[in-house]
Amino acid sequence: MTIALESIALPFGQEIRDQFPVLSQEVYGKPLAYLDNAATSQKPLAVIEAMDRIWRCDNSNVHRGVHALSQRATKDFDRARQSVKTLLNAASEMEVVFTKGCTEAVNLVAHSFLRPKLQPGDVILVTTMEHHSNIVPWQILAEEKGAIVLPIPITDEGEVDLEGYADLLHQHPVKMVGLVYVSNSLGTINPAKQMVAMAHSAGAFALVDGAQAGPHIAIDVQDLNADFFTLSCHKIYAPTGVGVLYGKLAHLEAMPPYQGGGDMIRTVSFEKTTYAEVPSKFEAGTPNIGGVIGLGAAIKWLASLSPSPDLRTSLVETMAKIHDHEVGLMRYAADLLSEIPGVQLRGTSKEKAGIVSFTTSFAHPHDLGTILDHEGIAIRAGHHCCMPLMKRLGVPATARASFALYNTAEEAERLAKAVIKAREMMA
């Protein structure tokens, strides 16, 4: 039986949607239904205006100038780092390193933190549902060091097999565990805190990929207790080209620089160079100033959706509302799709974020994506940078609809109707 629309909790309405200019357009004469949020989110006016302001009024390098433009840009840049600290509930701003994204963050940890520690025969564990960005950097390092990368098994429902994980930790000299908090392909929310604790009990370090967790759930890195946590900011309503690496301060202070250049040094001479303190030590060169300031604006905007005197409280409350909104839409869409003959849902774990992944017996995901595009519906079709997961599922690709706080029940219904139309066309 189809879920009654009245039973779905949708905290956000048209007033939120109106803050996203891109959503007002038509595609092929149909209103845009943007359901590709797991790839990147759209940006609210607050972020667009902050980006416009930096280029119009305050365009200058940061941390290097005494003139007014540089001082204003530096103030906004540094304030963004403070906001990220609060968003993640990090213990210190020094634990927040700006990167280009999760990919660079994982590479930084692999080459600066793990490389000196890794020995031949050591094992790195990653889950079978990992994004390539949390597989390939470890493989490159393992090949160099004579180590091994092994997959943590998952169930048919798309959940981590915790018994299998425990066995791997017991059977092998595991040095690092890389695990995704929320699967970008299936929407599975993994028991990250439990898995981190299991890794630590086995004497291993743990990195949590938070690329998909950031947009969907509140993050508390102190409670999670991972050694490292990555954040992909363009998925949380901020600009592209900005990411965050959280690392425990003791780790970051002990790690050598990942890249050399300006702004990561204390002194330079031909005899010896000394390095700046963290996080500057890992932020060589001119940063993505506009992007970081846009990130700060995005966090401020998120907090404004649940006004409270305390920024952390506002963010936690907003993320809870977002989770309820997106999960409500995900369940509604999944229920509608499951009643269509020939549609098979992929990833049916108990704990999920707002992502629906599915295949059909009547159309390849790429063909389905093209048909839906002509109905004004933007989804993602392919392997989602999760080729080992696709192999585990026994499919070449899936169609993925991923929801954000500006999506509506009507768009979930349009998705289902468009899939029905595709079925009729392909028949």
Image (cartoon, helix red, strand yellow):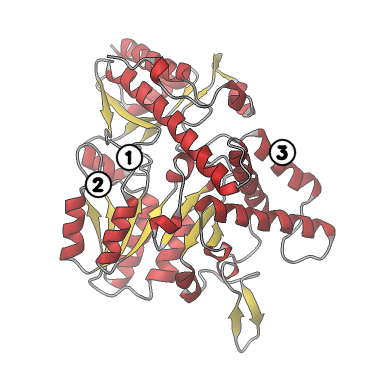
State the residue position of label 2. 160
Is 220 rendered above or below residue 237?
Answer: below
What percent of the width, then of the height, locates residue 53? 76, 43
Sort mark 2 into few (<14), some (14-19) or many (20+) by Cα contacts within 10 Å.
many
Residue 49, labelled with which disc? 3
Q: As drawn, which residue projects farthest toward the bottom?
A: 271
Mark before the other along the chain sequence, 2 or 3 = 3
Tell me the distance, in whole angstroms, between the alpha carbons under discs 1 and 3.
34 Å
State the residue position of label 1. 188
Tell me the distance, in whole angstroms, between the alpha carbons under discs 2 and 3.
41 Å
- Tell me: 290 left or right of 427: right
Front-most of 104 and 127? 127
Residue 300: image quadrant is top right
Say which amino acid is labelled 2.
Answer: Val
Identify the residue at horizontal 31%, vertical 20% (top origin).
335
Classify mark 2: helix, strand or loop: loop
- Residue 40: tell me if it is visible: no
What percent of the width, then of the height, locates residue 385? 37, 44
Residue 166: image quadrant is bottom left
| The C terminus, quarter of image | top left
Residue 423: image quadrant is top left
Sort mark 1 into few (<14), some (14-19) or many (20+) by Cα contacts within 10 Å.
many
Tell me the distance, in whole angstroms, between the alpha carbons under discs 2 and 1.
9 Å
- Mark 2 in CB contact with mark 1 (< 8 angstroms): yes
Classify mark 3: helix, strand or loop: helix
